[in-house]
Structure formats: structure tokens, C-alpha cells
Amino acid sequence: GENVEQHPSTLSVQEGDSAVIKCTYSDSASNYFPWYKQELGKGPQLIIDIRSNVGEKKDQRIAVTLNKTAKHFSLHITETQPEDSAVYFCAATDSGAGSYQLTFGKGTKLSVIP
Amino acid sequence: KAGVTQTPRYLIKTRGQQVTLSCSPISGHRSVSWYQQTPGQGLQFLFEYFSETQRNKGNFPGRFSGRQFSNSRSEMNVSTLELGDSALYLCASSLGGRSGEQYFGPGTRLTVT
């Protein structure tokens, strides 16, 4: 089955700096890669996703890149703000298989220092 | 449009008991997936239901079961509770097509004593 590794497990940045979180996956059949943000006491919130036919996707201060050959994808947050502080999870799945079984990384706790 | 709702939000049970958790997906969504979240194991897939049929199942014992109703609402049941079942149980809903986008509810925090 799929295995997703996520690094780093914790990340502290100064407000206004950029943050990068990296994930690798093992199953070459995976073609859908979402990123979730989870704040304390809440469920994960889908913030951005990317499919295997796209190399990069941006949404305001958030961007995700995908390297299918190397089987890794990354989340980039620019101009970080205190409200970006949360745990971020990457995930992977083969959405074409009729299955919605997301395999998650272990998470990255991001702290943005004002 | 209302998001995914889960009830109850918090639950305390004793070892050996059973528990039923409920999930109402986003209106129009036909797929419901369940995940268990623990500090040690992270987020793990339990099962997925689409149009009242279990479409996929994760690597959990048979004590964990679920079902989906004709209105897409779903329930999961855990029988003979063990201390290790203490976790946040999350429900995610999706349209059910090939988009893959899943939206999570706030979860039910289950504590087994």
C-alpha cells in the first residue's frame, strides 16, 4: 500500500518568512495530493490540492509543487502570519481507482512567531 | 452550504462497551469516509461508503463497522471497546466522483476508560 513520509515534524518561522513542508510517497499510482490544515480542536481543513497532471498550483500565499519522477510534493507558504500556526498534513491517493482512501503523512506543526 | 457535522462531539465509554458515532455529510455529497486520529498513529483510514455500500476498508479489526443510509448520513460502530480505541474519529464527505476532494467534520473525541 501507499506510504507517505512528511518532513519536518516541527517548524518555527518568523512572521513574514516563508515555510516549506515536504512529503514523499511510495505508490506510483497515486495521482491526487491534498494538503490539510488542522487547528486545535478542529477537523482537518482542505487548503490546497494538486493532481498528477500538474506540476505546480498556487492560491494566494500558498503553493504546492509536485515531482512525479522523484515522488515528492511540497507545500510552500509565503509571508507567513500568526494565523498560519497549525498542524499541516499531506496526503496521497489514487482517485481514479474509485477509492477515497487518503494516506496521510504524520503532520508538521508550524509555529509562526510574531 | 452547511459543512460536515458529527455527533456527539465528545464521548466517554468504559472498556467492553460499544459506541455509535454519527456523521452528516455536506448536502449533495454521496461518499463518506471515516478516519481515526491518534498521536501515535496519526490519521488512519477506517472505511468509505458510497450509495449505502462499503467501497473500501482499512486495516482495522472487525469490531469497527459502519453503514450509510439512503440520505447519505453515516454511522460507525465500535464494539467491545478497548483502551487503545481512544481517539478522535473524523468523518469526511466527498461528491463521490473522481475528484477526490474530501471535507472533514470536527470529529468525535472518544475516551475509553
Image (tube, helix red, strand yellow):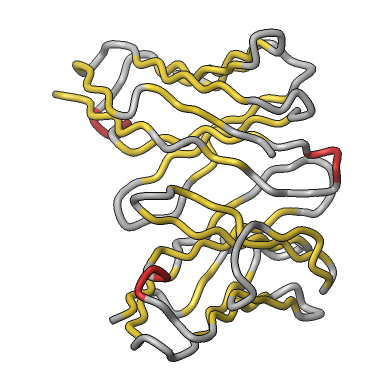
Q: Is residue B49 above or below residue A54?
A: below
Determine the image quadrant of residue B50. bottom right
Determine the image quadrant of residue A96. top right
The quadrant in which the C terminus of chain B is found is bottom left
Q: Is residue B103 above or below residue A26?
A: below
The quadrant in which the N terminus of chain B is found is bottom right
- Nearer to the camera, A35 or B78: B78
> What residue sits 43% from the left and 48% below the top?
B42
- Nearer to the camera, B37 or B95: B37
Percent position of residue A3, x then y: 59, 33
> What residue sits 38% from the left and 74% below the top?
B110
Say left or right for A38 vs A75: left
Q: Is residue B93 above or below residue B78?
A: above
- Nearer to the camera, B91 or A63: B91
> What residue sits 51% from the left and 61% below the top?
B90
Say left or right for A76 vs B92: left
Percent position of residue B101, x then y: 69, 43
Say left or right for B52 vs B21: right
Determine the image quadrant of residue A64. top right
> What residue sits 69% from the left and 39% below the top?
A1
Percent position of residue B8, x then y: 44, 80
Percent position of residue A49, x then y: 62, 30
Q: Is residue B13 above or below residue A10?
A: below
